[in-house]
Image (cartoon, rainbow, N blue to C red):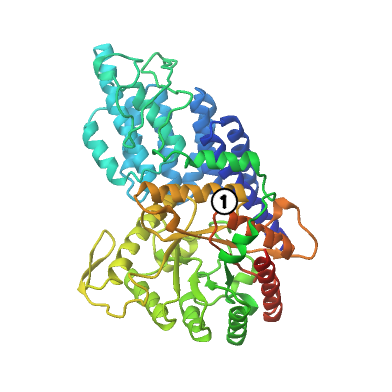
Amino acid sequence: MEAATQAHDAFSRATCLVFCGDAEESGGRPERAREQWGEAAEVFRTIGARGRLGFALVRLAYLDLGEGRPDAAEPRLAEAASLADGLTSADLTAAVGNLRALLAAHRGLLAEAGEVFAQVWAMHEAPPTRRAVAGLGLVAVARSSAGQEAATGEPADEPPGRTAPPRPAELLRQVTAVHGRVLEPLAHRAVGRLLADWGAAGAGRRGAPATGPSCTSGCSAVRRSGRPSADGRAPFAYPLRIPCEPARRPGRSTSVVAARWLSARPAGTLEPDSERAVHMLKIGLGAPQYGVFADPSTIASCAIAAEDIGYDSLWVGDRALVPDEPHDPYPGGGPVPPEYRRFLDPVALLSFLAHATQRVRLGTSTLNAPFYSPVLLARSLATVDILSGGRLDAGLGLGWSSDEYEAIGVPWQGRGARLEEILDVLERAWSDGPLEHEGRLWRVSRSHLDAVPVQRPRPPLLLGGFSAATVERIGRRADGWLGVGLPVPQLSYVIAQIRQSAETHGRDPQALRMVIRVNPLVQAEEAHTDQVPGRGTVRQLADYLLAAHTAGADEVLVDLQQTARSGTELTALAHQLHELLRQG
């Protein structure tokens, strides 16, 4: 248990370093980003978090390319590619593909770059952000090829039998269809540099400044240096900074917000606004569901006690099975905690809680949506909302275990696209009219599901995750985010990204609800500040949650099932924590 906890702490720290590095790079401090991503990579390598290691290596390789050091990027790319080959992650595979194509473009190998970009563009199971970068890369290669021909009088190298790529204008139109305007900043800027380098290439003016937008966001290059590659072929520009990120309102820059937090308020030093915390913070509790708490009498007594104490919500999780030899490490490293091997079905448990309680809202944090048929999921969740009198919060995610997907019979790849279609079906099933759907995965002929949720037009839909695709999806169509206990500066940064995504999609960013979950090990002695909220005293935990509220969290969710050993102990801890939070 102690080893698993240490691995979890290490994983959380490394994840925070990645977010910190993202903020530093976005704020124009690449060397600090390199230090933090490098440290995170070593931690991920030590605990065996192969997927996270791969993404950290991709970030570092982009920095190497940005500094004109392709030889340094090559080994990072090779290691990331080997990790991608050993995993079933379309996200990492696409990220590696985009990086490989950019490296080829840097060396002037336009045909090779185009081929790899085309492969990623054709990966419909990959996140839209990766495909959008690949599409922009294809546009850049098309322009670069035209520029090479104009400058040398010879056509760009093309392998025999290769199908000509679509024209740039058509590609840009297609990219717009998947471009969520919330791209991977490093990849986005790198492709923007390639586009900028050849902005006037059709006129044969190699090295001239770009004359038009370099991406579908309407950004353009401002500084560049057209360095020819070692073999004298087409140059690939890397300006020091290029504004290829979506336009933001003055004063709302995500990077500026993050930079202020990072420079002014180290983790654990934030003084919460007690007045605001007392009157506005919603407090949720993980419902008894795992280990010794998977007992009807314990569930009922703890749920009633939580409602009497004053908790605003109860939340259940989703687990299908716990393999002895998992293909994917438990988030945080190490094995799944023994307490989580015994668990109850989340939807059935919500129905039980609906009967046992009168006031608290009932949520899922999170339900692994791809496990389920969307029609049956719509029916089950609507039933919970009806039985509870309109108290359901539907929190959905993708899960982390490919073993569970295999056992259920659902493909691991393409789960993001599967979630998108599930959301489509849920919204149509819960509408006032008949259900009819024609999608890539499901077809529903005109049908009726008249037992719709009490909440109209539907229960709140909250999504969990951290990826760029998730941030874009939340901003575009969800009602909020189910986050975890990051250090306050990084938490503020992610929340700012999500709100920016909503604003980009023409939605009210302040209408989104931010729910932050922590699964602490509560102890009598104070923990080091770097370990909070993973462990610490009740006072330390309360201080963190109040600080998280000040950083933008609307609700905090505490699961005490890894700490408590009985229903009585869980209730006592829950009461103590609630009192401290209400006092501020």
The answer, for residue 163, to whether it is visible in the render is no
Residue 68 appears at what percent x and percent y? 49, 22
Residue that numbered label 1 is attached to: 491
The furthest residue to the front:
275
Q: Is residue 434 left or right of residue 380?
A: left
The furthest residue to the right:
525
Disc 1 on helix, strand or loop? helix
Q: Residue at x 55, y 42 (%)?
A: 258
Residue 226 appears at what percent x and percent y? 41, 17
Rendered position, 425 above or below 389: above
Which is nearer the eye, 257 or 339? 257
Q: Quadrant of the C terminus?
A: bottom right
Rendered position, 58 above or below 376: above
Q: Is residue 279 left or right of residue 169?
A: right
**Residue 161 location, quadrant:** top left
Q: Quadrant of the N terminus?
A: bottom right
Residue 212 appears at what percent x and percent y? 29, 26
Which is nearer the eye, 539 or 62? 539
Which is nearer the eye, 33 or 576? 576
Which is nearer the eye, 305 or 231? 305
Q: Residue at x 53, y 72 (%)?
A: 316
Q: Residue at x 63, y 51 (%)?
A: 487
The answer, for residue 190, to whether it is visible in the render is yes
Q: Is residue 430 left or right of residue 33?
A: left
Q: Is residue 206 left or right of residue 515?
A: left
Residue 108 appears at what percent x and percent y? 38, 21
Mark 1, other Cα within 10 Å: few <14 / some 14–19 / many ≥20: many
Rendered position, 424 above or below 237: below
Name the amino acid, label 1.
Leu
